[in-house]
Image (spheres, helix red, strand yellow):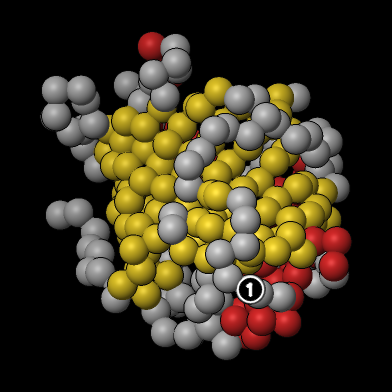
């Protein structure tokens, strides 16, 4: 049997921005989506966005998260679930599923529980049966949730060129920031990604962030090169509420 926990965690790491491949930044064709609409549903400027990010409630909360990983314009992997954020470490439960286009020997469906000190993963079969849970330490699994608020602040700090104005995300106004972030900018924001970028020789990548009125990032997109192919990651967060209980499997 393949070492499934390692495989699943590795794929999740790519989707969640904790790992990236070598190569130059490339803009992959954007997948069609109805979640973002152009226009200005409500007046906003960079000062308001900066204040929203600065004054965002620091209390822990949970959010429904969906991350889609594209290779070129082809959907490769979907991760969906609910995560607890703003705590000492992100925790939650997600399902990883490869797209229908994946070769049969590479297809997977898995359930992952993220704890503060480890992850637990098991394979799910089409008939609903589940495999054995496999535990991996955070360092070996490489799975983590990026601090999207910190990324938004880095984009805001790029100045007027990164400020794209108000758009509608899932029916609510959000301010879009867009630009390229360099390896050095991530040194204090995301040390794990910084180290991986250094080892991969990746100097920068392009990304967009949409910030709502509460200072929370509700959508994040990233473009990079992975093993010579253009990769595009799309992350959405919504249905914010109080933290949910998460426990290790018995």
Residue in the picture at 55% in, 44% down? 234
Residue in the picture at 80% in, 61% down? 162
In the picture shown, does residue 219 fall above or below 125? below
Q: Position of residue 10 (x, y in %)?
A: 51, 39
Q: Nearer the viewer, residue 243 or 218?
A: 218
Q: Nearer the viewer, residue 196 or 139?
A: 196
Quadrant that contains the C terminus? bottom left
The answer to whether residue 56 is seen in the rendering is yes
Residue in the picture at 57% in, 88% down? 55
Q: Residues within 10 Å of mark 1 (few under 14, many from 20)?
A: few
Q: How many marks?
A: 1
User: Can you identify the residue that label 1 sits on?
Assistant: 43
Q: Position of residue 205 (x, y in %)?
A: 77, 47
Within the image, what quadrant is residue 52 found in? bottom right
Q: Nearer the viewer, residue 208 or 184?
A: 208
Within the image, what quadrant is residue 193 found in? bottom right
Residue in the picture at 45% in, 17% down? 102
Q: Is residue 155 left or right of residue 166?
A: right
Quadrant that contains the N terminus? top left
């Amino acid at each position: 049997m393949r070492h499934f926990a390692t495989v699943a965690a590795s794929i999740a790491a790519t989707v969640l921005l904790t790992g990236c491949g070598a190569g130059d930044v490339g803009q992959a064709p954007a997948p069609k989506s109805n979640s973002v609409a152009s226009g200005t549903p409500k007046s906003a400027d960079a000062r308001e966005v900066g204040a929203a990010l600065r004054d965002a409630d620091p209390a822990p909360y949970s959010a429904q998260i969906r991350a889609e990983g594209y290779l070129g314009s082809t959907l490769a992997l979907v991760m969906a679930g609910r995560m607890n954020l703003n705590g000492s470490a992100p925790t939650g439960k997600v399902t990883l599923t490869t797209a229908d286009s994946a070769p049969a020997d590479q297809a997977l469906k898995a359930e992952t529980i993220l704890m503060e000190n480890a992850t637990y993963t098991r394979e799910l079969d089409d008939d609903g049966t589940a495999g054995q849970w496999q535990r991996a330490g955070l360092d070996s699994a490489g799975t983590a949730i990026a601090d999207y608020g910190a990324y938004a602040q880095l984009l805001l700090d790029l100045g007027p060129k990164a400020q794209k104005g108000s758009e509608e995300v899932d029916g609510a106004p959000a301010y879009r920031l867009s630009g390229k972030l360099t390896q050095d900018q991530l040194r204090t924001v995301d040390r794990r990604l910084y180290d991986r970028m250094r080892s991969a020789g990746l100097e920068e990548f392009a990304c967009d962030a949409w910030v709502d009125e509460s200072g929370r990032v509700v959508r994040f997109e990233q473009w990079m090169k992975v093993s010579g192919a253009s990769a595009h990651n799309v992350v959405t967060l919504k249905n914010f509420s109080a933290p949910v209980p998460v426990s290790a499997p018995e």
